[in-house]
């Protein structure tokens, strides 16, 4: 009997190795959800792990618009935008987004991942792409798809980005706006100045910032006063808008180039037009419901004050994404399990999603949370701290 020839053996070993290092990912089956509560295994938990920052996911306006859209359009687009899938619902959403963001054009994509793949690969074929080291995976993959030379710089460091650009001109400089695992913000004024100096094109993926930050909800660019200095803006509907899908906003030349050359736009089915109708309703709520952003800010302030009193370590961020650093994956999993026992659902984030030694609880807030629920979370975290201290 010779050695095994099962081609799955190497995969089994990789999975076993991941399990041994406490890095194995498992899906949870949600049986029901309402607002900030989810039901798992017959038990209702208070969730602090959703990206539904404004609490719009089950808003009646969105639900009604989706239902009416399905009555008119059915449940699918039927083909790609460039064949017969681009409807008046899609067109209206693009135009309303462009108006909201103060851009000449906006272009819909099926997902944020596909938007980033399409934009980076179309703008930098076999060129140079300079990216923040903690950028979203889709931005890194876009550079690889482009066959570009990918240069990564130290997180949120304008000086490190300048070193990577060196004496080059014409590079694509890419960053998240609000970083999804840290909750901090890119230094956009400095990066914009750097882009001008080096004749680079600045691209910002503000998936987690649009709708949440800025007085009008236009995101990190509005908050930092650089809306006119960032030619390529990416956003999604799966976070503050409470839905699904993504978009790119910019000038006429950018959007027409993407329509011609972004493979993840050209070669995929358009999002359902009924969903576009729902996201039009979400955009109206983003524009009009300023109280949602203020409530979010109140929750974050309340939480950070409480955590400081507990003596726990948070990253320095004033956004709805709060990272409680615990270090090793096993410890993050343990705290997540203890919180679940207390009736709260909080995700443990481990490498390679975050750097080695920085496993964490990623705690996110929604306008649908109450101040009392924030206090419940603080009490549960205090119990985790005490339980660990008692265990020695």
Image (cartoon, rainbow, N blue to C red):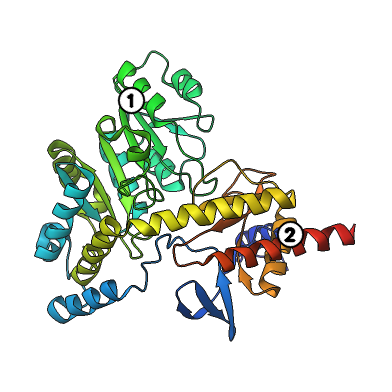
Q: Which mark is on residue 20?
A: 2
> Quarter of the image containing the N terminus?
bottom right
Q: Give the residue at the far top of this rendering.
A: 167
Q: At which x and y percent is residue 287? A: 26, 55
For the point 32% across and 59% down, which residue is it?
A: 237
Q: At which x and y percent is residue 362? A: 58, 55
- Residues 301 and 314: in front is 301
| Element assignment for label 2 | helix
Q: Is residue 84 left or right of residue 289?
A: left
Query: Label 1: few (<14), some or many (≥20) within 10 Å?
Result: many
- Residues 284 and 185: in front is 284
| Element assignment for label 1 | loop
Q: At which x and y percent is residue 39? A: 54, 80
Q: Which of pointers 2 and 1 lies earlier in the amino acid sequence?
A: 2
Judge whether 343 appears above or below 378 on screen.
Answer: below
Residue 240: quadrant of the picture:
bottom left
> Quarter of the image containing the C terminus?
bottom right
**What residue does disc 1 label?**
171
| Residue 347 seen by the camera | yes
| Residue 325 seen by the camera | no
Judge whether 166 appears above or below 389 on screen.
Answer: above
Q: Nearer the viewer, mark 2 or mark 1?
A: 1
Q: CA distance from mark 2 to mark 1?
A: 41 Å
Q: Is residue 203 left or right of residue 379?
A: left
- Residues 201 and 311: in front is 311
Query: Label 2: few (<14), some or many (≥20) within 10 Å?
Result: few
For the point 13% across and 65% down, which residue is it?
A: 89
Q: Is residue 193 left or right of residue 85?
A: right
Judge whether 6 appears above or below 321 on screen.
Answer: below
Q: Give the residue at the far bottom of this rendering.
A: 42
Q: At which x and y percent is residue 170? A: 29, 22
């Amino acid at each position: 009997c010779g050695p095994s020839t099962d081609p799955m053996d190497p995969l089994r070993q990789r999975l076993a190795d991941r399990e041994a290092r406490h890095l194995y990912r498992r899906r949870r089956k949600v049986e029901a959800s309402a607002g900030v509560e989810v039901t798992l295994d017959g038990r209702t938990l208070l969730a602090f792990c959703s990206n539904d920052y404004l609490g719009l996911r089950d808003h009646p306006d969105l639900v009604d618009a989706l239902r009416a859209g399905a009555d008119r359009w059915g449940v699918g687009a039927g083909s790609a935008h460039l064949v017969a899938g681009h409807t008046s619902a899609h067109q209206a959403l693009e135009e309303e987004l462009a108006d909201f963001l103060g851009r000449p054009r906006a272009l819909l994509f099926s997902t944020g991942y596909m938007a980033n793949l399409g934009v980076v690969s179309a703008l930098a074929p076999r060129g140079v792409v300079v990216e923040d080291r903690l950028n979203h995976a889709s931005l890194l993959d876009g550079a690889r798809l482009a066959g570009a030379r990918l240069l990564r710089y130290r997180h949120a460091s304008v000086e490190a980005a300048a070193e990577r650009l060196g004496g080059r001109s014409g590079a694509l400089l890419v960053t998240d706006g609000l970083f999804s695992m840290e909750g901090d913000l890119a230094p956009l004024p400095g990066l914009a100045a750097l882009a001008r100096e080096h004749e680079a094109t600045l691209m910002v993926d503000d998936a987690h910032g649009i709708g949440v930050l800025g007085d009008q909800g236009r995101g990190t660019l509005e908050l930092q006063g650089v809306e006119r200095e960032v030619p390529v803006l990416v956003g999604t509907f799966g976070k503050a808008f409470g839905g699904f899908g993504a978009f790119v906003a910019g000038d006429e030349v950018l959007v027409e180039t993407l329509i011609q050359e972004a493979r993840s736009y050209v070669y995929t089915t358009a999002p359902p037009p009924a969903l576009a109708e729902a996201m039009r309703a979400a955009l109206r709520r983003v524009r009009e419901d300023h109280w949602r952003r203020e409530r979010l800010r109140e929750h974050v302030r309340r939480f950070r004050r409480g955590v400081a009193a507990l003596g726990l370590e948070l990253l320095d961020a004033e956004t709805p994404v709060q990272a409680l650093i615990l270090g090793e994956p096993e410890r993050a999993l343990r705290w997540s399990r203890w919180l679940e026992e207390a009736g709260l659902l909080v995700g443990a984030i481990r490498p390679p999603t975050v750097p080695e030694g920085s496993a964490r609880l990623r705690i996110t807030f929604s306008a649908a949370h109450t101040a009392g629920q924030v206090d419940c979370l603080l009490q549960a975290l205090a119990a985790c701290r005490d339980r660990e201290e008692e265990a020695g």
